[in-house]
Image (spheres, coloured by chain):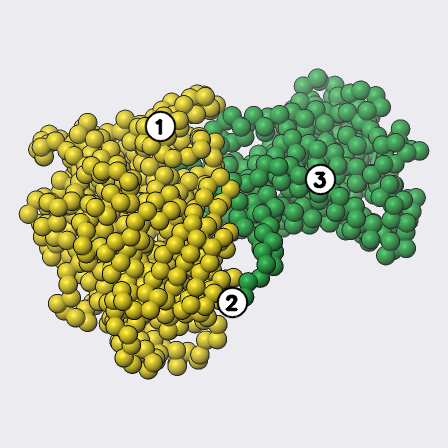
Amino acid sequence: MPRLERRPTPSRLWTAATPVLAVIATMFAGGLLFAALGKDPVEAIRTIFWDPLFGEFASYSRPQLLVKAGPLILIAIGLSLGFKAQVWNIGAEGQYIMGALAGAATGLAFYPGDSPLLFPAMVVIGALGGGLWGLIPAVLKLRFGSSEILVSLMLVYVAQHILSAAAFGMLKNPEGRGFPGSRNFQQFPAAFNGELIAGTGMHWGVVAALGSVIAAHVLLSRHILGFHIRVAGEAPRAARFAGVSPALLTSVCLGISGALAGLAGLFEVTGPAGQISTDFASGYGFTAIIVAFLGRLHPLGILLAGLLMALTYIGGELAQLTLNLPSAAIQAFQGMLLFFLLAFDVLSNFRIRLARRARA
Amino acid sequence: MASRKGPRRVTGTGTAQLLTIRGLTKAYPGVVANSDVSFSVAEGEVHALLGENGAGKSTLVKAIYGLVRPDAGEMRLRGELYAPAEPRAARAAGVAMVFQHFSLFEALNVAENIALGMETPPRQRELAAKIREVSEAYGLPLDPSRLVGDLSAGERQRVEIIRCLLQDPKLLIMDEPTSVLTPQEVEILFATLRQLSAEGTAILYISHKLEEIRSLCDRATILRRGKVVASCIPREVSARDLAEMMVGSALTPPARAARTVPEGPPALEVRGLSVASPMPFGTSLKDVGFTVARGEVLGIAGVAGNGQDELLLALSGELTSAPGMVRAAGADLGDKGPNDRRRAGFVAAPEERLGHAAAPGMSLVENALLSGAVRMGLVRRGFIDWAATRAFADAVVAEYDVRTPGTHVAARALSGGNLQKFVIGRELSQNPSVIVINQPTWGVDAAAAASIRQVILDRAAAGAAVVVISQDLDELMEIADRFAALNEGRLSPPRPVRGLTMKEVGLMMGGAHGMQPPEPDAAGVLRAEASDAEA
């Protein structure tokens, strides 16, 4: 009977190999799922993974890769810091919304100003908005011992209600003929986050995402805060022994991940989305959780995972359009990725022993 | 249980072999834990398994208990091939084991805990009656309805032993059973083990305490680096001989210069220290007070769970107290955290190596940074100087003889003794002025223990004030200048070690927790002062 035996030291090979295995397994299982839905599995997989980059409509979908990957990576980097320290922020979606609202509201308050300081100010306030929203679960946890998992998740729904209230009320476009939604930032150059290089999808959010990858890598490998984050996740009592204050660390992790999610929201609303609208929240905050784990909570891994996840997003939409796949099937497909990743993850800490069952 | 009490073969080496092991080999990646190990245990024999840390004792008993599958070799139980695939199979074959660390649920009562370990537990009432019956038969009184969380370490061990006895074992494996007991409790345990042995149950006894082995065990098998190097009748050799067989070289007991209890202002002053325990079922500290001078070693004894962990936390700064309760060299550290205390020259080594003193999955380099960052200047403007950290870790490994393939390996890959040497070395090499250590040699072999005690004494000789919290009385007697005991969170007034008798020590520790030894005149186990001369 095969048995699992703990490795003395986690295997580096398997740590790197499990995401690849998980992707392959997802392709197989996803293919089965699509076949069960009566679609050609090979074509479906090709539509999701190949066509967005090299297919017929690639010139449209290729820039989308960075547009989608940017916020995913930015949010996932923030989440990964918390996850490493076993601080479970599940509410990045809410922090993303609140960051977008805070930043957009700042910009719209100065409409139609043209100060070059406006956009940077919006960025700062966007980060603050997300960060403060992220600190609510931290404060409640420290004050009342509530679970940050539940509180951060529930705050997503609060944020969504605030979003629709803003879209219908405070931030509604005065010239919008009564339709919900704010002014479009495309018509507000000082606050618009446009493409930096035409046709690539590269905007300031993508730059911020890449910056966050590098910053997180430096933080985790060279900075004492990153070390404390890793120790806290690895052995909480050892962290306390090292002088880490659990309260402070929880707040820092929730604050940083909230701020990065807020930034992602701000860059999204002022760029690709263009306006505050009721359907602005598109689930990046939740998908980023998968991205964080798919990337092994490692900054470079998250960069790759974010790109991969963006690909399945775009490819999934394409498959919905061209193959009439239901969107639930695409979501199930993305969920499988996390499922297989966690399943294969066992192999980096354990080895399989194929031992014959001995007679007792 | 009736069958147990019937006449059985008497103890002795002339009787039939119960367990025979031949050529047992088990290799882990990078290390051969057992290499061609052969030995046998006779029916009713108390057989000692002796060896340094990493000598392969644990792997060997895990193989016997079905937790580890040997790569080669065979085991025979009463002549029949025996290859347990899992502990359940071992138990079915009549092999039971009491682990060094208990696996009990504190929030459940004794009977519920015992039921959890059984394949087909009887109804609670029947089980409780059975527990009472067994516990009385073996002089191990235990109330089945008490919560395990309220029991002393000695009583918890009794739960584990009774759990084993209910299976009516032929072979009982005990892994370092006395490390958590008071001298009085040790006597009770030994009386029980002798009774079991007289009734025909073989006992495989793992311990580092050589005197215990000499007084209890019929035979000893000595392991070194995974191989059987000797076997002997412990009564016929001295403790020193045993230790040398185990280590393979002559031992040097810790040496210290003439004991002159130093004068001058106290380097560490604890006054009226009262803090609530952060742990459920923990013991709060109540009005603890003592002073330690430069160059002095204060030994603090106590049965496990009487506030030792809390005292360490309150001294290391992980648990802060009111201002003024803890002072080092005049500086008030009562409400300061660990790093502020380190800055003031204060280092601490907690008892639990993995998970508290060291992060299991992190490398030795990272673990060196864990507590060395402040005093060794390993962090500049928030950024870690990894080169300096690596050099620090390498220095600790070299200076304290930590056996490891390198400093890049995870802490959990080291054997207990080696990790302990690393942890102690990490703290002592930071040039501290106050040192607090909880259980410096818990689960560490004799050679490593001797070297750890020596470096502690060296640090004291160099002028550090040292507090050693330990459950090993021999150790405290050996290295401490003054002695105090924790009992239910209160500290007895410290007394000079010189002239203390074991009986006084036992009383300071709070006696045997209401236990009656079944044979009041059971042979004294703990060597008194007499054996000091011998060691």
Chain A: colour as depicted:
green
Residue A216 drawn at (x, y percent): 59, 29
Query: Disc 3 is attached to a residue of which chain?
Result: A
Q: Nearer the viewer, mark 3 or mark 1?
A: 1
Relative to A127, A248 lies left or right: left
Three-letter residue code for mark 2: Ala
**What's the distance in space between the residues labelled 3 and 1, CA to CA?**
40 Å
Q: Residues within 10 Å of mark 1 (few under 14, many from 20)?
A: few
Q: Residue B444 is drawn in which quadrant?
A: top left
CA separation in Å, label 2 and label 3:
40 Å
Residue placed under numbered mark 3 in the picture: A20
Report which residue position mark 2 lands on. A360
Q: Residue furthest left?
A: B499
Mark 3 element type: helix
Marks 1/2: CA distance? Answer: 46 Å
User: Residue at (13%, 40%) from the top-left corner?
Assistant: B481
- Residue A34: x and y in percent read 85, 52
Residue at mark 2: chain: A
Nearest to N terminus: mark 2 or mark 3: 3
Task: Name the residue carrying label 1.
Answer: B398
Q: Chain B: what color?
A: yellow
Q: Is residue A292 above or below residue B302?
A: above
The tally of labels here is 3
The residue drawn where x is 49% and y is 45% is: B28
In the rendered structure, the answer to whether residue A231 lies left or right of residue A167 reads: left
Q: Nearer the viewer, mark 2 or mark 3?
A: 2
Q: Nearer the viewer, mark 1 or mark 2?
A: 2
